[in-house]
Amino acid sequence: MKISLSLVLLFFTAYLQAQTHQIIKHNDEKINVNFIKIENNLIYYTFPESSEEKKISKYAVAQLNDKSNKSHFIASQKIDITKRADYKKVIILRETETIGLKKLETIRVFTPKIKGESNLSTQERGERRLKEKAAFKGNPFFVIVSSKNEYLTAISYTY
């Protein structure tokens, strides 16, 4: 009986001392989680009462607090876009890196190829124009979804 009671108490205390963290998002939402890892700009975690692995973009997370030793890790700085000249702060993401960010609108720009210009420089010019347009609208992120003919189409995201 003593052994079974000891095992029950051991498992109960292990559950209470389980690794618990708190994710604080840039929109001030707080989520209690069990942190797993950071990989490919994604934070992997589980909820304390579940073992299902979830993920969120590190760009959506301001910081990750470890409740057991009161330490914190800053995942990303909030990007404040106030004017069109802030286009250099705008980040181009992959579709998988948008988990936890809010989808806003579709942005489309016309980028004709100039005679003698390489495909790479045309692509760079188009990305710069997309960044300028996203900055003008105050959106810190976008994902390029299509580059047909001379048009670049992207979906913008925010916190």
Image (spheres, helix red, strand yellow):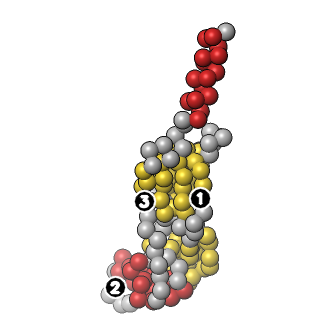
The residue tagged 2 is: 117
Q: Position of residue 154 (x, y in %)?
A: 55, 76
SS class, disc 1: strand
Badge 1 crowding class, 10 Å Cα cut-off, few under 14, some 14 to 19, many 20 or more, is some
Report if the CB atoms under discs 3 and 1 are less than 8 Å apart: no
Position of the N terminus, as image quadrant, is: top right
Q: Position of residue 67 (x, y in %)?
A: 50, 47
Q: Which mark is residue 30?
A: 1
Taking depth in this image into account, of 71 and 110 the one nearest to the observer is: 71
Residue 7: x and y, percent? 60, 18
Query: Which residue is at 42% across, 50% downward?
Result: 71
Give the residue pinned by disc 3. 74
The kind of residue tagged 1 is Lys
Q: Nearer the viewer, residue 101 or 123?
A: 101
Relative height, residue 59 to residue 46 (above, below): below
Res 101 label: none
What distance separates the C-alpha of mark 2 from that of mark 3?
Answer: 41 Å
Residue at left offset 50%, top offset 73%: 141
